[in-house]
Amino acid sequence: MSNDWRLTVAESIKRPLFEHAEVVAGSRGLARPVRWVHVIETTDSCQYLNGGELILSTGLGFGGEREKRLAYLSELIRRKAVGLCMELGEYIPNIPMDMLEMANHHDFPLIVFHRPVRFVDITQDLHEHLINRQMQALRDLEAYSRSLQQLSLQYQGIPRVLQHFQNAVQTQVFLYTPDGATQYVPPLPQSVQTELTELMRSHLSQLESTNGTVNSFQLTDTKQIVYQPVMAMGHLLAYLGIVLYERQSDEYLLLTLDSTVSTLAQIMMRKMFVEEQALATENRLFDDLIANRPISEEWMRSHLGLSATERTPAYLTMLMSFQRVSNDRSDSLPPHDLTAVFRSVLSRLGWRPFIRCTGSRFTFLLVERQPKKDSRRLLEKAMKDLERITRQMMGADVQIWFGIGRVGRRLAEAGQHLAEAQQALAFQHEAQSPFFSDLGLFRLLFHIPPEPVLQNFIDDYLGPLLAHDREYGSSLVSTLRVYLDAHLSKQEAAEKLYIHRQTLYHRLEKITECLGEDFTLPHRRLCYEIALRALDWLEKEPSTPESNKKSGPRSLARPDSGTVE
């Protein structure tokens, strides 16, 4: 789009009604656009201005009083009016030098009518002209949006859209992608492209967060960059920017920018979904991993596209499980629709991600592109991004859990590391960390067969308390757990159990009767804490006969978060 919709002060005074008008000061401000026309005679009435108005006056409100006329003119300038048209006559026969000096100092156009003119005719003429131009601009915007939709369906949609956008705004445009090459229309010399790309990277790295709004920053006094993020599902895909030289952004230019951004987001998302459909090999890979089938190193390398001589990169396994608290969000996306966005997030952080969505769980195999020294920090950032995107797309009430295995070095052991991620997911609440390496004691329990070793250990140490709870409906097991976790502090244990101290004393007496006086001694206490954790572990086990027959690493899941298929 061109700027024909704007009516400047210079264009206004070329209208027939300004035939006998003369610009006596502030001629450098004639390029200012006129938004509306008002008749204002006093300083008090200036409070109703919004900016961009061309003011008409006879001088009735201030006449020959110096303080009043300077206060009037100063207030118009402060309120961002674009010019003052005065009729010379009875109230002000000529423009005083002090008004001329102030107008010139602020580049504020001061226009005089040497002959009487009807202000109502001027307002009607300029308002009609403004409305006609604005209506034409809206029609142009609608036509531009329709043409964008057509271009989005063509081959090489993004370059065509950028070219169409550049034709509309008539200035330098560019598409900056954080993890890809920046596209410039029209093309710029390589040195200029590199400099501009670095400027964008430096500026954007200082932003704390990204939303979908338009932003800008100055390059020089006369040049600025205006840009808008291209967002999809709450994820940043790119930035569409324009370079303005001796020109300010306006609402129609920004509407054109916004329409183009929406079209680019659709093209990019469509491209991402097509790429996802072409990755059927990954699904076969995860089917074998999830089923815990033996996988050879050569088979894994082949599926990951690694040559026989290429060094095996480090990798991580991660699980993300979620559950909607309410099921009334019929407008939310199916979980697998987030796969393409998740892939973009993880790729940008330096991994080659392999992703599979099964039910309400995502399984990730993250292969490092380059060796990382801060993989844990990057994973924590990735989890925050995935959680934010999931909540934005599926609802703020969705509950999300993660589990992450240890760093893998041999691809054939990916199944084992996936089992570690499953264990970390199952015990994240107890360990306060999604990392398997932080599980502590739970790492040992994972490798002990539940029958008969763990069950016999639990019966030997907690059997009397479990029997008492079953027979009398008491809570001795949970009381012991809280008491030991509180480091034998009766006050803290009573507060966590929400009971009176006397009630706690009574329960501890029953526990002593069942377990003996020495249950708080260090070596005995450690056994009870292990038994309590083992009891929690078995209660989290799937209760199917097939799962009870397994030995070695087991397939775990929260009762409320779905199971790994």
Image: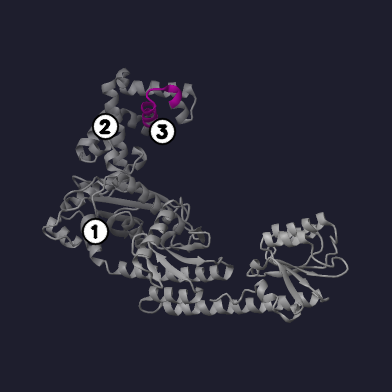
Q: Could you say which is closer to the camera, residue 537 or residue 438?
A: 438
Q: Is residue 478 left or right of residue 112?
A: left
> Could you say where residue 525 lies in the image, as x and y percent from the top left?
30, 24
Q: Which residue is label 2 attached to?
A: 459
- Residue drawn at x 48%, y 71% is 171
Crowding at label 3, few (<14), some or many (≥20) Cα neighbours within 10 Å? few
Which span of residues is magenta-colored? 477-492
In the picture as drawn, the residue positioned furthest to the right comes out as 90
- Most foreground residue, 222 or 27: 27
Place residue 492 in its image quadrant. Answer: top left
Q: What is the C-alpha distance between the residues marked 1 and 3?
A: 45 Å
Q: Which residue is found at the position 34% from the left and 60% from the top?
A: 179
Secondary structure mainly formed by the magenta segment: helix
Q: Position of residue 301 (x, y in %)?
A: 16, 59
- Mark 3 element type: loop
| Residue indicated by mark 3 | 473
Q: Residue at x 50, y 76 (%)?
A: 168
- Numbered disc in front, either 2 or 3: 2
Q: Amino acid at mark 2?
A: Asp
Can residue 214 be seen? yes
User: What's the amino acid at mark 1?
Assistant: Phe
In the image, is residue 482 part of the stretch drawn in magenta? Answer: yes
Around disc 2, counting alpha carbons within 10 Å, would you say few (fewer than 14), some (14 to 19), or many (20 or more)?
some
Task: Say whether residue 565 is visible.
Answer: no
Compared with residue 522, is residue 105 higher up or lower down, i.e. above or below?
A: below
Separation of disc 1 and disc 2 at Cα?
A: 38 Å
Q: Is residue 497 magenta?
A: no
**What number is the disc on residue 100?**
none
Q: Residue beneath label 1, please? A: 286
